[in-house]
Image (tube, rainbow, N blue to C red):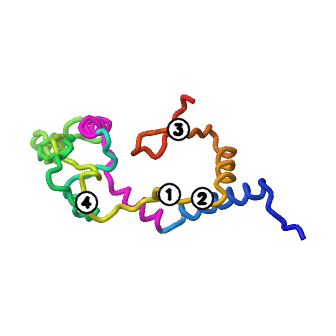
Amino acid sequence: MAENKPTNRERLREITDGIEQGIKELFESEKYMRYLSVMSRFHRYSVNNTMLIYMQKPDATLVASYNKWKDQFERHVKKGEHGITIIAPTPYKKKIEEQKLDPDTKAPILDQDGKIVTEEKEIEIPMFRLVKVFDLSQTDGKPLPELASSLSGTVQNYEVFMEALHRSAPVPIIFEAMAADTDGYFSSDR
């Protein structure tokens, strides 16, 4: 009696269905929610500060202040690490006396003696100062959540999986030698 082996197309469909289900489960998982929650606590730096970070530590990935690493992420800066200098806004408030203006005419409001009425107003004056931040690589402590970890071992039906990947990818997939600390890259030049 002949055994009904799945065709290549059926195995391809099975693998792509598995990938789709895995992605769906990931985005609906507690792990994904925890990842987003932690990543949302990292500051989004301005273009200028991003450039400052890059100039001082080109391999920086996640950057935060000493206290933020300690208090929010349960990590500490390693002994001997030098901070990355960025520019932080430190505005201050000042109270000033200002003429009270008529909302319609914008003319100064006068009291019964004909004197201009003033009001105390608080204004914010922009100021900046240099602060130190540290990259994840400069810290130790509680691991940050990851969506995926490095894979090792063997993959069942590897050839079929790769065929499904090549067929479904909107860009060509090429394997080539890369630096040891690189997991992959995308280039539109190919």
Furthest residue in direction bottom, as rendered: 1
Residue 105 seen in the current view: no
Task: Give 1 or 54, whichever is nearer the viewer.
Answer: 1
- The residue lying at 33 percent from left, 63 percent from top is 143
The residue under label 1 is: 151
Q: Name the residue beneath numbered marker 2.
A: 155
Tell me the quadrant of the picture where the C terminus can be found. Answer: top right
Marks 4, 2: nearer the viewer = 2
Across and down, in percent, residue 128 comes to 17, 40
Q: Position of residue 6 (x, y in %)?
A: 79, 61
| Foreground residue among 11 and 103 | 11
x and y percent of residue 105 in the render?
Answer: 29, 36
Q: Amino acid at mark 2?
A: Val
Q: Which residue is mark 3?
A: 176
Please report the bounds of the magenta region as a residue range: 31-57
Residue located beneath label 4 in the image: 140
User: Amino acid under label 4?
Assistant: Asp
Task: Single out the residue that lies furthest toward the right.
Answer: 1
Helix, strand or loop at mark 1: loop
Residue 46 covered by magenta stretch: yes
- Contact between labelled residues 2 and 1, with CB atoms less than 8 Å apart: yes
Camera sees residue 188: yes
- Look at 46% across and 58% down and name the residue there: 149
